[in-house]
Structures are given as C-alpha cells and as structure tokens.
Image (cartoon, rainbow, N blue to C red):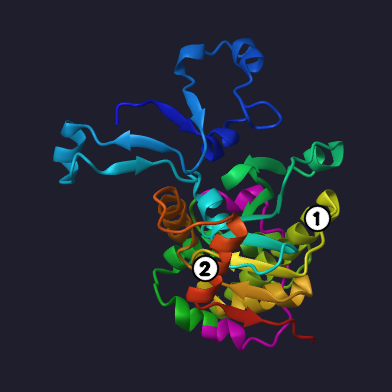
C-alpha cells in the first residue's frame, strides 16, 4: 500500500513498547541507541491500510483495488483469537515446534513473581493481553524422528501409547535439547545423570517425550493460573500439536482438566476472522468470533483419566 506501519501484537514482542502496550517506549529506545525513525506508526489488528500499489498488484496478480488489512500478525495472537472457547475461564496451548502456554487477560501482570517465572505480556487482538510462557513443543519428536530417519509418526505414537513400563519424566525445557542433533542420545544421557529410567526402544523414547511435554504444559497452565489469579476450567490446545492424540490425552491427565483439541490451523482462522470483521463480513467481539469457530470447526474433547 505504501503505508508504513507496525501491527501492535507483533510489536509487543520486541520489548520496546510502554507497559500498557499502547505506544513505543522512546525513552528505552533512545537509551539503547536505536534510531527513532525506524519505529513505524503502531496500528491495531483490523486496521485497514489501503489498497495495493499498482506494482504490488501486478507482482501478486491481484486487482489494485484489493484491500490490505492488518491482522494479529504475531502468529500466536491470531491463533489465540481462534480458540473455540465458550467460557472466559480457559487456558491455551498453541503447540507446534514450540509451545506457548498462557491465559488471556485485559491488563498485563507486572509482578516480580511473573518476571522471575519468565512470563511475558504480549499483545492480543482488541487490546487483550496474552500472558504466557514459551516452552518446548514437538521439536523433541520431530528432531528424534530425523535422527531415526523415519517419518512414521502415527506408528511411533501407536507404539508409545501401548507402553506400560515406567518412563522418565524429564525437563523438556533443558537447554541441551534446543540444538539440532541426536536428541535420543541426549535424553538418555540426561536420564542416566539423574537416575531416571533410560528408554530402551523408540516407543519408550516417544512415550517419555510426550509424557514430559504434557507435564511441562500442565505445570505452565497451573503457573499461569496462579500468577494471574485466573480460574482455568478448560485447556484449549491448538496448532499442529492438537493432532497428537496421545499428547492431548496426557495433557488432560496431568492438568486434571478437560483438553479441547483444535483447530489445527488456528493461526489461519484468526487471520481470516480479523480480515472478515474489518470488511464487515462478520461482526462482534472476540467472544462472538470464537463462538463462530466453535460452531463450525470440529474439536476433540479429552477428559482426564486416572491411573
């Protein structure tokens, strides 16, 4: 469009906004020696930026009259918008390679406890706050599969589901698991160092990984609830990880709360909903947009199991 702007949900992740998230913190920016001129006008998701320039329209093969709308350009902001919740008392897990676990608030949490717990206040659509913590996601599985040179995730998960032996619950967020490479060997070394059961085959490795991810998710959900004073009745798990039935069930077990899985493409849904509302194709609050998702997108419900 030729208009330069910074969408607020993405800008909020820079750490350079005021505490209320409404404007750039120029005092901090100047203290860091950054040029003020590179910080564009802040706009909200749903703002209309104009129409495509002729050059851009030609490059994209679109009409110059195509309207450009700002969306929740941080992918998690769009994903959280599309959480199909019918209650305000929910936590979310946006699970892909990484997991983003938190609750939605109207105002940031600025306590020392939340800082020490490494929680962040990120911008959401319509001025909401995504109070969340980043944790490990399905990276552990995908990188282990790369080491094993297999793409049979369904087979590995089926074998892991059948495991009855005790498996190690390890710290999925340990820094040793971040770099690419032979993660199964690193997991085995971690377990030996701490006297935990060392997985004996691929099924046990996968079960140990998924149990550990579920434990991390549950701990973080509870911490988000405690730090924010928010009641959590249900956990919504969206993104690619929502297709992993074992992960969803074990997360429900460890959270002691129902887990609703889906949509897988929550980010895309959130993106489209903001554009549709901006163009007048749908109307209403975030809650009504979520109700639209809930009414039209199948979700799977996992209830906590004991034992």
Q: What's the mark number on residue 292?
A: 2
Q: What's the mark number on residue 139?
A: none
Residue 72, x across and y down, in percent? 50, 46
291 within the magenta span: no
Dot 1: within a 10 Å radius of its alpha carbon, few (fewer than 14), some, or many (20 or more) residues? some
Residue found 78% across the figure and 64% down from its top: 232
Residue 279, x across and y down, in percent? 39, 50
Is 257 situated left or right of 80 in this image? right
Is 11 situated left or right of 187 in this image? left
Vertical arrangement, residue 188 with respect to residue 179, above or below: below
Vertical arrangement, residue 122 with respect to residue 216, above or below: above
Q: What's the mark number on residue 223?
A: 1
Q: Which quadrant would the C terminus be assigned to in this image?
A: bottom right
Is 307 situated left or right of 283 in this image? right
Residue 275, x across and y down, in percent? 41, 50
Vertical arrangement, residue 200 with respect to residue 132, above or below: below
Of mark 1 and mark 2, the one earlier in the sequence is: 1
Q: Which residues are magenta?
A: 158-179
- Give the main secondary structure of the magenta stretch: loop
């Amino acid at each position: 469009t030729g208009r330069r702007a910074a969408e607020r949900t993405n800008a909020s992740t820079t750490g350079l906004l005021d505490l209320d998230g409404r404007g750039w913190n120029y005092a901090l920016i100047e203290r860091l020696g950054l040029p003020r001129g590179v910080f564009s006008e802040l706009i909200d998701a749903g703002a209309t930026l104009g129409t495509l320039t002729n050059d851009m329209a030609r490059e994209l093969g679109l009409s110059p009259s195509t309207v450009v709308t700002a969306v929740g350009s941080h992918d998690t902001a769009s994903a959280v918008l599309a959480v199909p919740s019918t209650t305000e008392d929910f936590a979310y897990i946006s699970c892909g390679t990484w997991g983003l676990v938190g609750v939605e608030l109207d105002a940031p949490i600025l306590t020392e406890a939340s800082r020490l717990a490494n929680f962040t206040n990120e911008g959401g659509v319509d001025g909401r706050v995504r109070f969340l913590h980043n944790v490990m996601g399905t990276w552990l599985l995908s990188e282990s599969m790369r080491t094993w040179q297999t793409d049979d995730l369904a087979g590995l998960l089926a074998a892991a589901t059948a495991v009855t032996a005790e498996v190690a619950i390890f710290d999925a967020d340990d820094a040793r698991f971040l770099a690419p490479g032979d993660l199964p060997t690193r997991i085995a070394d971690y377990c030996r160092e701490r006297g935990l059961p060392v997985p004996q085959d691929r099924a046990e490795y996968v079960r140990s990984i998924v149990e550990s991810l579920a434990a991390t998710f549950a701990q973080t959900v509870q911490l988000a609830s405690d730090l924010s004073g928010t009641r959590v009745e249900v956990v919504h798990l969206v993104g690619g990880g929502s297709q992993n039935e074992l992960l969803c069930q074990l997360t429900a077990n460890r959270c002691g709360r129902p887990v609703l899985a889906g949509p897988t493409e929550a980010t895309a849904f959130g993106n489209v909903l903001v554009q549709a509302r901006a163009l007048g194709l749908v109307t209403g609050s975030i809650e009504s947009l979520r109700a639209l998702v809930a009414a039209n997108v199948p979700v799977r419900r996992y209830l906590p199991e004991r034992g």
